[in-house]
Amino acid sequence: DLLLSNSCIPFLGSTEGLDFRTLLLDEERGWLLIGAKDHIFLLNLVDLNKNVKKIYWPAAKEKVELCKLAGKDAHTECANFIRVLQPYNRTHVYVCGTGAFHPLCGYIELG
């Protein structure tokens, strides 16, 4: 119904089936940060599909292999699912992912 009434703008990056997990909205700067499976997206609030920035952040290959050896599903469990997007200061966001059951965190500079 929303699409038919032109009441929404779909995010085209979602066609990749990335299993979106967490969001961080900054209305003041006009962006939306989205955590997904192995990816982090920075979207413009005016046009979600304009100037999309994407960071590919997979789990280390050896961690994925250990995850699979432990009997976990390679496609639904052995990835880096982004779970934390937290503002750190005016220029950085603190980010954490599952890292195929070996959590990892870092900082993203928002230039």
Image (cartoon, rainbow, N blue to C red):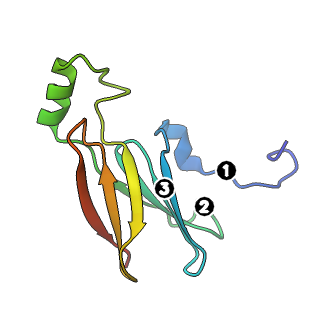
| Residue 92 location (% of width, % of height) | 34, 75
**Which of the pair 13/107 is nearer the observer?**
107
Q: Secondary structure at mark 3?
A: strand
* Residue density around tag 1, few if under 14, some if 14–19, many if 20 or more, within 10 Å: few
Q: Which residue is mark 3?
A: 34
Q: Is residue 52 left or right of residue 93?
A: right
Q: Which numbered disc flags the more N-terminal residue, 3 or 2?
A: 3
Q: Secondary structure at mark 1?
A: loop
Residue at x-position 38% and y-position 27%: 76
Q: Which residue is mark 2?
A: 48
What amino acid is labelled 3 in the image? Ile
Residue at x-position 37% and y-position 48%: 82
Q: Which residue is mark 1?
A: 10
**Which of the pair 57/25 is nearer the observer?**
25
Q: Is residue 100 left or right of residue 7?
A: left
User: Which residue ends up furthest to the right in the rendered image?
Assistant: 5
| Residue 89 location (% of width, % of height) | 37, 80
**Which of the pair 46/22 is nearer the observer?**
22
Q: Which numbered disc flags the more N-terminal residue, 1 or 2?
A: 1
Rendered position, 38 above or below 64: below
Q: Which numbered disc flags the more N-terminal residue, 3 or 1?
A: 1
What amino acid is labelled 1 in the image? Pro
| Residue 94 location (% of width, % of height) | 33, 66
What amino acid is labelled 2 in the image? Leu
Mark 1 in CB contact with mark 2 (< 8 angstroms) = yes
| Cα distance in 3D space between marks 1 and 2 | 8 Å
| Cα distance in 3D space between marks 3 and 2 | 11 Å
Q: Quadrant of the C terminus?
A: bottom left
